């Protein structure tokens, strides 16, 4: 084993209680999207304590909103910032970004939790709390991996950037995209989302849309004189449900099946109708998320939804005369696919497989993440992170042993990517095979 690998393993094993402690501290910070300031102050503090150069990126809506990958969260950027901790290597090496987001989704409804979402409680091998897996464990793991190398005084040739960003949960426009647009681009990018120690190289295209159906209001005692928007909406709902089922059977992308169990989804997420129990509902609004695979695009998805809604409306006299309205909002991203044959991906898989002593799987996911932005800058990106469960749900948790393993992989890869050790090793192996 390389000497630095032995040092890294011993350091992380000796100090893993400190790693866990920092994850607990961050889980206690209620950084629900739009309220990330306290969490970013925490990240800036620990970056400074490690001797990193601190850079702030404040999102510029005017600049970002014209980018084709921008997603408007609807949350103002005022008093919100991204923090970058930068370590400048000795020179001559390749650069690397370790990326994580500080924002978390709401823990509501709180009564569904068996323990506090803001406590960071450890039970057995798991640490519980909102954001424990998604993705404060990965965020802290990034920092701890670099801290390990700095504390051990292991020399690095290339520059390492730690990105602590906002609003990934709402599309990443003010977070990852803002940092990349400001020039914080490196030769490789790793987002440490919870991915069960697999390497993710693809994710689905994602779009949100809403359908509005008008009815005719009337008093409930004269309901026969009205037209209930709820009933009319169900025609649209069932048409979209059939479309989702059809696409689930017919639209296949192997990496998504491997990582998520199903390639595409059409999910009705909210349905609002009426405003008073004694009124015939005059308006119904259905909001949905549609996912799609590489080879499909946003334009074709918009056309598909339009055709399905129009066809469903054509089968009802009221909807013919009062056509449903379709609005596209929120998340709007093309599919992402990183060539798994790229040197960056192969190098990472090689290192991770060595450290974990098993073959690391390459997968795709039917959900989205910030790594997709790298495709707009012609740079390679992947996701790799610890194991967890109940993500976005009650009793979210992260598996602590997987965090330790992920941190070891990251620390070793920082050395090997930025200083070229892994490539040299691969060349030596190729030479040895050629001579035997």
Image (cartoon, rainbow, N blue to C red):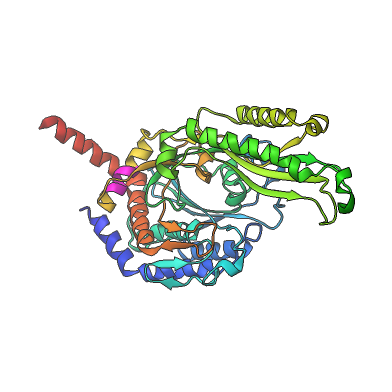
Magenta residues, start to end: 348-353
Which residue extends farthest left?
Answer: 436
- Residue 346 falls in image quadrant: top left
| Image location (x, y in percent) of residue 282 | 83, 45
Pick the residue in front: 405 or 91: 405
Asked if the magenta segment contains residue 350, the reply would be: yes
| Residue in the image at 43% along x and 48% along y | 159
Where is residue 2? Give x, y as percent.
Answer: 22, 53
Q: Give the image location of residue 167, x and y in percent.
A: 61, 52
Relative to 84, is 246 above or below?
above
The answer to which image quadrant residue 435 occupies is: top left
- Residue 70 vertical placement versus 306 (above, below): below
Main secondary structure type of the part rendered in magenta:
helix
The residue at 51%/38% (across/down) is: 264
Relative side of 426 to 126, left or right: left
- Pick whichever, 332 or 325, lies toward us: 325
- Residue 89 seen by the camera: yes
Nearer the observer, 189 or 87:
189
Q: Is residue 272 magenta?
A: no
Location of residue 377 in the rendering, given as x and y in whole percent from the top left corner:
52, 35
Q: For the C terminus, give its image quadrant.
A: top left
Vertical placement of 261 versus 144: above or below?
above
Left or right: residue 338 compared with residue 271: left
């Amino acid at each position: 084993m390389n000497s630095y690998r032995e040092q890294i393993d011993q350091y992380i094993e000796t100090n893993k209680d400190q790693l866990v402690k920092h994850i607990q501290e961050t889980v206690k910070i209620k950084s629900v999207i739009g309220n990330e300031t306290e969490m970013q102050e925490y990240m800036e503090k620990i970056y400074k304590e490690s001797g990193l150069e601190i850079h702030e990126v404040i999102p510029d809506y005017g600049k970002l909103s014209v980018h084709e990958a921008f997603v408007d969260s609807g949350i103002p950027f005022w008093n919100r910032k991204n923090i970058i901790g930068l370590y400048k290597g000795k020179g001559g090496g390749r650069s690397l970004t370790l990326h994580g987001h500080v924002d978390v989704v709401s823990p509501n409804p709180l009564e569904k939790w068996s323990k506090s979402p803001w406590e960071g409680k450890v039970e057995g091998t798991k640490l519980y709390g909102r954001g424990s897996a998604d993705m404060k464990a990965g965020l802290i793991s990034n920092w701890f991996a670099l801290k390990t190398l700095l504390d051990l005084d292991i020399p690095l040739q290339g520059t390492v950037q730690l990105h602590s960003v906002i609003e990934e949960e709402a599309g990443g426009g003010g977070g990852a995209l803002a940092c990349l647009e400001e020039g914080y681009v490196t030769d490789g990018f790793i987002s440490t989302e919870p991915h069960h120690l697999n390497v993710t190289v693809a994710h689905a295209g994602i779009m949100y849309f809403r359908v509005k159906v008008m009815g005719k209001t009337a008093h409930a005692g004269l309901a026969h004189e009205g037209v209930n928007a709820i009933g009319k909406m169900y025609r649209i709902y069932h048409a979209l449900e059939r479309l989702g089922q059809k696409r689930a059977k017919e639209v296949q992308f192997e990496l998504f099946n491997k990582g998520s169990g199903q390639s595409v989804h059409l999910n009705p997420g909210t349905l609002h109708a009426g405003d008073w129990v004694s009124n015939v509902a005059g308006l119904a609004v259905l909001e949905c998320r549609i996912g799609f695979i590489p080879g499909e695009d946003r334009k074709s998805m918009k056309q598909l939804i339009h055709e399905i809604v129009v066809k469903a409306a054509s089968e009802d006299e009221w909807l013919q005369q009062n056509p449903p309205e379709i609005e596209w909002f929120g998340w709007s991203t093309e599919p992402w696919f990183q060539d798994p044959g790229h040197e960056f991906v192969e190098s990472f898989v090689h290192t991770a497989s060595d450290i974990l002593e098993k073959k690391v799987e390459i997968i795709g996911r039917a959900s989205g993440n910030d790594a997709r932005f790298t495709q707009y800058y012609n740079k390679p990106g992947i996701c790799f992170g610890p194991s967890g469960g109940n993500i976005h749900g009650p009793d979210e948790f992260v598996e602590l042993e997987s965090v330790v393993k992920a941190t070891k992989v990251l620390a070793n890869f920082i050395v090997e990517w930025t200083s070229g050790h892994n490539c040299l090793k691969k060349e030596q192996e190729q030479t040895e095979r050629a001579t035997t």
